[in-house]
Image (spheres, grey):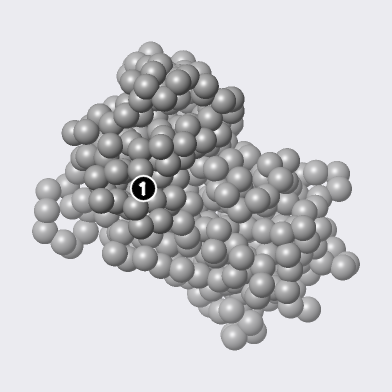
Amino acid sequence: MTIGIQNIAFHLPANRQDNAAICAAHEFDEAFIADKLGINARYIAGPDESTADLATAAARALLDASGVSADKIGLLMVVTQTPDYCLPHTSALVHAALGLAKSVAAFDVNLGCSGFVYGLSTAIGFMEANGIDFGILVTAEEYSKVMDPADRATAPLFGDGAAATLLSRTPQYAIGRTTFGTDGSRHEALIVPGSGTRAGDASPLAMEGRAIFNFMMSEVPGDVSTCLERNGLGIDDIDAWVFHQASKFMLQSVAKRIGIAQDKVVIDLEDGGNTTSSTIPIALARKVFALEAPPRRIFLSGFGVGLSWASTVITMSETPES
Amino acid sequence: MSDANNDDILTVLRNEISEVKGEAVEAPDEAFREMHMIEDIGLDSLDLMTILFQVEQHFDISIPEPDIDAHDLARVGNMADYVKRAKA
């Protein structure tokens, strides 16, 4: 059977920061954060809690919940832009922590908010090409380690977290055609300056909120249309829409522009905020797969850092195995 | 739209602001021009971002970030004048 999504688990750090705490420290408007951003709390990793730690916890939760033993895993892919080290790759650390076999292919993918959708296509293509039956796609990010906690544009918005997705030949959901996009000319809209080899002083995460909003409103509707067309579908064929959880305001704005009924748009920001590449799998786990009667056909779209975007459609398998 | 007069621009701004606010802004044109979108009409910074995007799309212009504060574009009349100059 074709490889698809069998299960998803996630892990959030223990340190919960609610809106009252963040507003008391920085004079943010609590009602604005709750109503417009849609966030009540975000989770912040401790100083000794790394991205690989979050990734490992999510992967362990996934294996436990799925009843799949670690020795069956043939691929481990970690999507992150806040790795434990510039080198080695974070997936190597997660590989060791999980005690996976030496025959496992483990590599990182450096993408942000589009990373889960990119990761699905990359991991499944890799598994199909190499005859691998079980793979784990992890998304993990600790923006708190690269953010200025006093920055009004980013501090209320982002939280740390990780998600792990089990890919197998007994999927609950099959993946359709995926569309991708990149506009590297706007890479400075969301950036951590001085964090790599390019000369410059190190400074915290900088986000041009209006540039990101304009990008989303300009590029995502067209990508949605192209993706639907490539999958032979129309807007009304989609039962639920899971966009990258940028903010409630962003989701409602783009849904309105595309012409999607707001009640079909999954919003999962209240408890955890924007966890970048993990928002889509966490939303799927909490707000979609957990339903008694999950929707059959779900549209996924990730967009952000790069600037980069990707969309796909997942469809419930005819004979779900779990 | 290759050109725009004051009435056209004010009508577009009124429609966009009313759409974002969720209710019609019915002040006469002269009073409407004097209104500040945040302080008088009750929009917030994200609403203003939406208005700017819609104005850019509608009039096919680009509004650089520094111009927002430099020209106090949150005030309706200033925004209308800015668009008129951009389309001249």
Looking at the figure, which quarter contains the C terminus of chain A? bottom right
Vertically, is A308 above or below A158?
A: below
Residue A270 position in % (x across, y down): 58, 31
Q: Residue furthest top?
A: A24
Q: Is residue B14 visible?
A: yes
Looking at the figure, which quarter contains the N terminus of chain A? bottom right
Q: Residues within 10 Å of mark 1 (few under 14, many from 20)?
A: some
In the image: residue A20, left or right of residue A172:
left
In the image: residue A240, left or right of residue B38:
right
Residue at 68% across, 50% down: A260
Residue at 56% across, 25% down: B24
Residue A127 position in % (x across, y down): 61, 78
Residue at 52% across, 21% down: B26
Query: Which residue is under mark 1?
Result: B4
Residue B67 position in % (x across, y down): 22, 39
Residue at 62% across, 39% down: A268
In the image: residue A313, left or right of residue A77:
right
In the image: residue A255, left or right of residue A88:
right
For this rendering, which residue is in front, A86 or A124?
A124
Residue A311 position in % (x across, y down): 58, 64
Q: Is residue A52 visible?
A: no
Q: Residue type at mark 1: give it.
A: Ala
